[in-house]
Image (tube, rainbow, N blue to C red):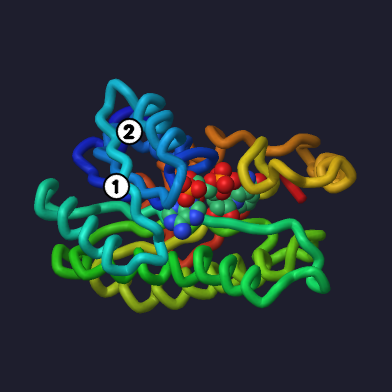
Amino acid sequence: MLDSLQGKRALVTGGSRGLGRAICRALTEAGARVAFTFSRDEEGAAATVAACAPADAEGHRASVLDAAATALLVRALEARWGGLDILVNNAGISQNLPLALLEEEDFDQVMDVNVKGTFLTSKAVLRGMIKRKGGVILNIGSLAGSRTIEAPVHFCASKAAVEGMTRALAKEVARYGIRVNCLAPGLLEDGLGRNLPDHRLAAYVKHCALGRVGAFDEVARFAVFLVSDQCPYLSGATIGMDGGI
Ligand SMILES: NC(=O)c1ccc[n+]([C@@H]2O[C@H](COP(=O)([O-])OP(=O)(O)OC[C@H]3O[C@@H](n4cnc5c(N)ncnc54)[C@H](OP(=O)(O)O)[C@@H]3O)[C@@H](O)[C@H]2O)c1
């Protein structure tokens, strides 16, 4: 993968920890210039910048729900870098609650960040990609988007929506030389899965062919391949990476 993204310019949403940080690091290791967003975690953002050193990853506080801030950031990056080649829609949230305990605001919040955030950021970046006739968007989905597993309904609904958006957008923008895919991890070492009850973790490991949860770096390395020119004939796809569930 070394140098497979040399000269590419990437924006990653939700890069202040977890999978987003691993993706930022893997993209920089492959030679890409990387900017990432976050909404609150300043300390985590600084740790991501440090994790990407000696490459110069840059963190920007901009919620994926703030369309104006996102558009401003995208315009500034395009002006400085001459364009963006790669967008990774990674920012995502969840709450581990059964439907009966979910409030309407909980449902809206998860759908907003996971679905509307993907829409708003893609819209901001696509204008330039269409003008330059090329680019790659990688949406981060989840095993929960398509499988019958014990997971919060609003999270499952949001990730199923991301898969649908992936397919429709891939068709819509293929004529401009833009690819759109969705990488759907299973349960990972930390991040959104961090507060899972022990029995849920044990059930996952028991049913997983590889008998363990995934590592952020394992998913991030595959993400690099998916957004690289080494993967030119893949679009509209959702690829599961879950150790065999
Ligand atoms: N961990 C897993 O087991 C797992 C499994 C399948 C799929 N995934 C997917 O992987 C992605 C990353 O999850 P993770 O586990 O790494 O979670 P995480 O550790 O909680 O990280 C989430 C990231 O998103 C950012 N974020 C949250 N709301 C945001 C907003 N409104 N605007 C911009 N950034 C925002 C967070 O930063 P701030 O808090 O600073 O905003 C943080 O950087 C998500 O899409 C998730 O659904 C994770």
- Residue 213 lies, in percent from the top left, at 72, 38
Q: Is residue 59 left or right of residue 16?
A: left
Rendered image: mark on residue 28: 2
Q: Position of residue 182 (x, y in %)?
A: 50, 59
On screen, 84 above or below 21?
A: below
* Numbered label attached to residue 184: none
State the image quarter where residue 52 is shown: top left
Rendering coords of residue 131 (x, y %): 15, 68
Q: Is residue 84 left or right of residue 149?
A: left
Write down the quadrant of residue 99 in the picture: bottom right
Asked if the residue at label 1 sits under 8 Å from ligand 1, the reply is: no
Label 2 is placed on what type of residue?
Thr
Q: Is residue 43 above or below residue 196?
A: above
Q: Which residue is mark 1?
A: 10
Q: Amino acid at mark 1?
A: Ala
- Expressed as whole percent of the image width and height from the top left, the position of residue 51 reads 40, 26
Q: Quadrant of the N terminus?
A: top left
Give the residue drawn at x 32%, y 33%: 28
Q: Nearer the viewer, residue 244 or 97?
A: 97
Q: Is residue 233 visible?
A: no
- Element at label 2: helix
CA gap, disc 2 to disc 1?
A: 9 Å
